[in-house]
Structure formats: structure tokens, C-alpha cells
Amino acid sequence: MDKQHAEVSKFLSYVLRHQPEAIGLTLDHEGWADIGLLIICATKDGKHLDQHLIKSIVDNSDKKRFAISEDGLRIRAVQGHSSQQVGIEYQEKIPPEFLYHGTATRFLSSINEQGLNAKSRQYVHLSADEDTAIQVGLRHGKPVVLKIKALNMYEQGLKFYQADNGVWLTKFVPPSFFIQM
Ligand code: HQG
């Protein structure tokens, strides 16, 4: 992805996950925005988007962050939201035995004490593989990976969901389900 694409991808993450109101955009409960309206709102904000650029970013997103509706008219972020406008009803799913969460070492003592919480997002994000977790942790500093007894959590009644791009979501992970690596 080139620099322009990366910048627009960040902008799309910002408005489709966190602050649609910053450009006067409205998302529906499932997170969808009308693409025509998104282009108008973005242009007013000085960001020049068009259908072609948006489609190319959606298709080339390394983490498959966005989806376009079947009729081609709407776009949404598939996970990562903090906006109160959005409450995607993810389908519950039985997790694998273990899932992984990457974070920075400086957060560890607090996480070990309080458990993993969603912070500004709506869910705690987990991955099925350790490598992805390391990459996620690197965004915050010196990475450390927590191995989570996910199936065990599920058997005790805690719910798991999987976004369209494979990211696992849950509301909270109590410290008793950590295996520190
Ligand atoms: C930490 C990216 C102290 C948590 C990635 C994390 C991901 C605590 C940070 C997605 C804590 C929140 C999400 C506690 C949790 N005390 N720190 N009790 N509980 N934390 O960015 O998981 O590129 O909101 O460990 O790939 O890092 O944006 O979450 O370090 O899938 O598409 O609080 O974002 O995807 O940070 O990342 P974030 P995350 P995109």
C-alpha cells in the first residue's frame, strides 16, 4: 500500500470506527455508511476520495479492515469500533482452546491485576496466532503476548465473537484465564 492509500485507510478507520461525527457522517447500528455520503462529507473536510480509491483500499487492506455491502452502496469497518453509534451484532462462536493478545510490557502489571478490558473500544481483541499478537503488541511498545484459555472461558459462560476479518472479540478477560508467555 502506498503512502496516499495508507493515509486514506487511517482516515477511513477514524471515521468508520471512532468519530463519524467529525465529518458530519452518520453510521447505522451495524456500522454502515453510505459511500456517496462519505465521499461528500470527506470532500468538505478536504479529503478527496472517490469510489475507485475506496474500493482499492478495501481490497488491499492487509487486515481486511473494511467491507463493502453486496449492493456496492455502503461501507463499514468490520471491527475495532469505539463509536456509540455502532453496535454490530456479531455472531457468537466457539473459540479455539487458546487465543492470543499482544500488548506492551508496561501494561502487564495493571492487566494482571484488573484483567483485559476493552479500553476505548467495544471489545477486547484477540488473535488465533501468536505472530499477529506480537504485531499488535508492537504498536504499543515492547511487546508481550498473553495466551488466553479461551475455550475454558467459553465453557464458563463468557461469550466470543469473530469479526469478518478473523479477529476474535470478547468483552473482558479475567486474569485467571491468562497463561503468560
Ligand atoms: C491494553 C489493531 C492496562 C491492551 C490491532 C492494549 C487489533 C490494558 C490497550 C486492534 C488493560 C488497548 C486492537 C488493563 C487492556 N490495564 N492496559 N487492565 N486492558 N489493556 O489499540 O488490542 O490496525 O484499543 O492490552 O490489529 O492493541 O487498528 O487495542 O494494549 O486487532 O485494524 O490497552 O487494533 O487493528 O489498545 O488493538 P487498543 P489492541 P487495526
Image (spheres, rainbow, N blue to C red):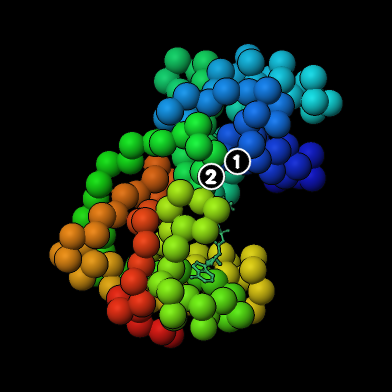
Residue 117: image quadrant is bottom left
Label 2 sits on what residue type? Ser
Residue lying furthest right? 46
Q: In front: 84, or 3?
A: 84
- Cβ(mark 1) to ligand 1 < 8 Å? no
Q: Which residue is mark 1?
A: 18
The mark nearer the N terminus, 1 or 2, is 1
Residue 87 seen anywhere in this rendered image of the structure: yes
Q: Residue 132 at x, y = what percent?
A: 50, 65
Label 1 sits on what residue type? His
C-alpha distance separating marks 1 and 2: 5 Å
- Cβ(mark 2) to ligand 1 < 8 Å? no
Q: Residue 46 at x, y = what percent?
A: 84, 26
As drawn, 177 above or below 126:
below
- Which quadrant of the figure shows ligand 1? bottom right
As drawn, 114 above or below 163:
below
Q: Which residue is mark 2?
A: 82
As drawn, 14 above or below 32:
below
Is 172 positioned to the left or the right of 14 in the image?
left
The 10 Å Cα crowd at callout 1, few under 14, some 14 to 19, many 20 or more, is: some
Q: Image quadrant for the C terminus?
A: bottom left
The answer to whether marks 1 and 2 mark residues whose Cβ atoms lie closer than 8 Å is yes
Residue 14: image quadrant is top right
Q: Residue 118 at x, y = what percent?
A: 47, 58
SS label for mark 2: loop
Q: In front: 57, or 156?
A: 156
Q: Residue 104 at x, y = what percent?
A: 59, 75
